[in-house]
Amino acid sequence: MLGQFFKYFFSYIFRAKTRQKLLFLAFVGLFLSSFCLLVLQSSMGGLQRNLMERSKNVTGYTTIKLKDNKAKEYEKLFKKLKDLRLRPQKELEVELLIKKGAYITPLILHGIDTDSIEVPFLKNTTLQELILPYDLAYKIQAMAGDQVQIISPGHVDYFLGELPRSQSLVIDDLIETKVPEVDLLHGYTRLRVLQNLIREKVINKIVLYAPIKADLLKKELKGLDVEIVSWEEKNKNLVWALGIESTVMIFLFVCMALLVSLCITSGLMVFFNKIKTDLASFWILGASKNDLERCSKIFLILISILACGLGIVFSLIFLFVFDYYAPNIMPDIFVDRKIPIFITLEGILISFFIPTFISVTFSYMTLGHFTRNSESLFEQIKAYG
């Protein structure tokens, strides 16, 4: 009986001359809800992931600082991290000023240990004296081969007063990291050059360029007096903003699904009102009222799953085709000229279950309202006769 009941329902909605158009529109609306939600999540997720990956490849996944700041302790820590294959990079980071002619601007200079360079964008460069990003070089009107002056206000020499230490360096090369906060403020030199400027043979941090969970890293470094700062902790505001962006996106599509559910409610009210005599016919043929109600509930669940499932399938097909054939549609000013696609299991589940849950909930409410307010099946037959 269940099969015949479903066959009747599907035929009435999709094939009958008097088919229920409101319910058909609701079916299409559910399809579009799951389709658009997954497409938008995957495209926005791709943009967010690329943004974070670019930043992590430049600033590292994790920064480790020893509270004692002893060179020997850093060497021991570096060796341990090297054995764990976490791609550690010894660095000395100092806040300075950079000057060329009449132009002067703040600079965060990184002293890189050239014996084992793990910074991805520096591996193919010749690091002799100084490497600057294009944006920072443009601020001081400098180019590759120019000589600039590095000034350290925090380190002074005493000669007829306090004089900030300075050193002249030649710009070896200009780079582009595609991370704005780095391109505008940071520079790179050899560790020995920076140590010579401050006249201390020290390093003040080790940067990891391989991903590792914070709990696992703390377990490996247990017993050491270290400060571990992940990329997410250093960029709390950005992570929070990206999270809000995703939440608002899902909220908007939940609202869209709620609007579709209003169409579902209206369609079902008209639909069940039109077929109440046919339901009485099923009762005459031997189906109990509980069987009819149970079959109706199963049908509503099935139609919701079918609509949302088709939306997911078609959206996956669309995303794969779009990712493979999509041209560079973004202007030159954008880092990602082509919209990146990043499909996750979480995104698929959200895109499927949210519209399905809302649809089933409203459908049950409509069915319950119809069951409570409808006449008995016997009265329906008498009225029809």
Image (cartoon, grey):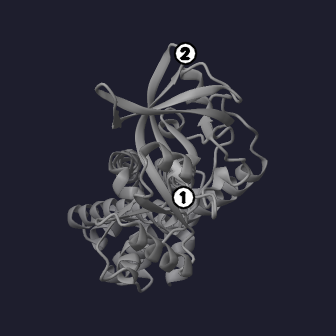
Quadrant occupied by the C terminus:
bottom left
Could you tell me which residue is drawn at 40 percent across and 48 percent down?
242
Quarter of the view holding residue 382: bottom left
Alpha-carbon span between mark 2 and mark 1: 78 Å
**What residue is disc 1 on?**
13
Q: Nearer the viewer, mark 2 or mark 1?
A: 2
Please determine whether, in this image, residue 157 is positioned above or below residue 300. Answer: above
Residue 101 tag number: 2
Image coords of residue 252 (percent x, y): 38, 44
Could you tell me which residue is drawn at 61 percent across and 61 percent down?
118
Quarter of the view holding residue 171: top right
Decide which of 96, 163 is in the foreground and name it: 163
Q: How many marks?
A: 2
Q: Residues within 10 Å of mark 1 (few under 14, many from 20)?
A: some
Kindly identify the amino acid type of the residue bearing the numbered disc 1: Ile
Q: Secondary structure at mark 2?
A: loop
Image coords of residue 136 (percent x, y): 55, 29
Image coords of residue 266 (percent x, y): 36, 49
Please determine whether, in this image, residue 49 is positioned above or below residue 280. Answer: above
Kindly identify the amino acid type of the residue bearing the numbered disc 2: Gly
